Amino acid sequence: MSQRFGEIRQIAFVVRDINQAMQYWGETLGIGPFFIKRNITFEPFIYRGRVSPSPSVSIALANSGNLQIELIEQHDDVPSIFQEFSSSEGQGLQHVSAWVTREELREKRTELLAQGLLIAQECTIPASGVNLIYFSTENKQGGLIYEISDLAEPEHKARIASIQNAAEVWNGEGVWREVVQ
């Protein structure tokens, strides 16, 4: 567990083609099913300290045991940490995430900024109300972006549990499921 950020609950990969990525993870690695929400935008969206237009992304989530796997495909060239990574690295592991409460999120934000860390991106997913802060730790030895989100709030527990439960009973059929709400 990171004493600074908290326990890593999720690893996230930026991908060029989310359908191909889900197929690979499901068929080759045996991880699934993925729950995919397409064409998400954030509100507000703050990139490198400036309120900015939101990118459009698709996000797919699955579990491997207690660890959540996130796949992210950005559909446009709007500046974001996902677009930065895609331009420089192509695709691959882009960030890890710790889940905290809203109060802990505010406290961690203040504490980490006071320690000299910089926020690369900060946003909210309007449909779910999830708040995300991405700290710029990628330029250090072996570093990457570290996300803190308020997924430890009670209203998110059922959704998180349903993804994990689906993984536990998954028989390998139906690699992904569309989330329309």
Image (tube, rainbow, N blue to C red):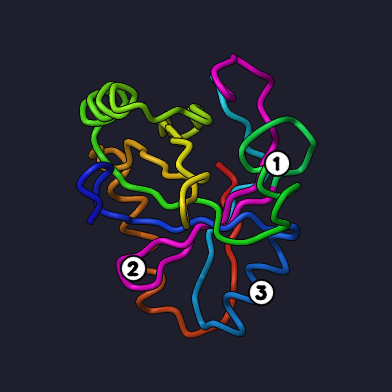
**Nearest to N terminus: mark 2 or mark 3:** 3
Secondary structure at numbered mark 1: helix
Q: Which residue is mark 3?
A: 23
Give the residues drawn in magenta, as a range. 45-73
Secondary structure at numbered mark 3: helix
Instruction: State the mark number for residue 50.
Output: none
Q: Which residue is mark 2?
A: 165
Q: Amino acid at mark 2?
A: Asn
Q: Position of residue 177 (x, y in %)?
A: 58, 62
For disc 1, the neighbor class at 10 Å (few under 14, some 14 to 19, many from 20) is some
> What residue is shown at x 59% (from left), y 24% (from top)?
47
Residue 88 in view: yes
- Give the Cα separation between the discs numbered 1 and 2: 32 Å
> What residue is shown at x 29% (from left), y 38% (from top)?
155
Q: Is residue 82 left or right of residue 32?
A: right
Q: Which residue is mark 1?
A: 83
Q: Position of residue 3 (x, y in %)?
A: 20, 47
> What residue is shown at x 71% (from left), y 44% (from top)?
74
- Marks 2, 3: nearer the viewer: 3
Residue 45 in view: no
Q: Quadrant of the C terminus?
A: top right
Q: Position of residue 9 (x, y in %)?
A: 33, 56
